[in-house]
Image (cartoon, grey):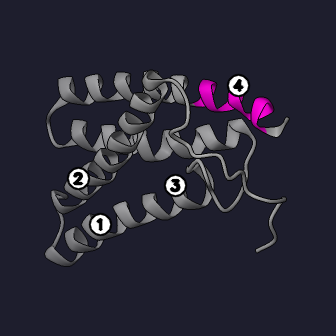
Amino acid sequence: MPSDGPRDPTPLLDGPWYLTANELLAFALEVTALACLGWWGFGADEGVLTRTALGLGLPLAGAVLWGLFAAPRARVRLPLAGVLVVKAAVLGGGAYGVHARGHSTAALVLAVVMVADTAVAETARRSASPARAA
C-alpha cells in the first residue's frame, strides 16, 4: 500500500503530562470499546455459532478498522471527518453494546467520556501537527 510520505518519528506521548494522560485514557477507551463489542456479540440471543462469530468478529472488525484508519499511526490517512466516522463506529458501537446488554447509564457515561476524550485527543494531535512539520 503506498505511503503518503515519511512517518513522523516524534513519540505520541511527547508533550505535557495532561496530554499524555489523555492519550493513555484514549488507549484504555479503545480497548474497552473492543471488549464491549465482544461482550455484546457473545450475549446475542442467537445460536452458539452466531454468538461466537459475533463475539470474536465484532472486536476483530473494530480493531482492523481502527488500525487502518483511526490509529495515530494509521496505515491509511483519512481527513478528520473520516477518522471521526471510524471512531464513532468503533467507540459508539462499544457504548451501544453496553446499552444493548442492559446497562444504559453505564453506556451513557462511557459515551460521554469517549466523546470528550476524542475531542481533546484530536484537537491536541491536529494542533501539534504543524509544529512537528516545522
Number of numbered discs on residues? 4
Residue 14 versus residue 23: which sits nearer the camera?
Answer: 14
Q: Earlier in the sequence, mark 3 or mark 1?
A: 1
- The stretch in magenta equals 122-132
Q: Earlier in the sequence, mark 4 or mark 1?
A: 1
Q: Earlier in the sequence, mark 2 or mark 4?
A: 2
Q: Earlier in the sequence, mark 3 or mark 4?
A: 3
Look at mark 1 in the image and give the residue it sits on.
54
Look at mark 3 in the image and give the residue it sits on.
66
User: Considering only vertical position in the picture, is 96 above or below 55?
Assistant: above
Magenta region includes residue 56? no
Residue type highlighted by circle 4: Ser
The kind of secondary structure element at disc 2 is helix
Marks 4/1 in contact by CB < 8 Å: the verdict is: no
**Rounded to the nearest whole Å, what is the CA distance between mark 2 and mark 1?**
8 Å
Look at mark 2 in the image and give the residue it sits on.
40
Dominant secondary structure of the magenta stretch? helix
**Rounded to the nearest whole Å, what is the CA distance between mark 2 and mark 4?**
36 Å
**Quadrant in the picture for residue 84:** top right
The kind of secondary structure element at disc 1 is helix
Relative placement, left or right, of 124 versus 19 is: right
Residue type highlighted by circle 2: Trp
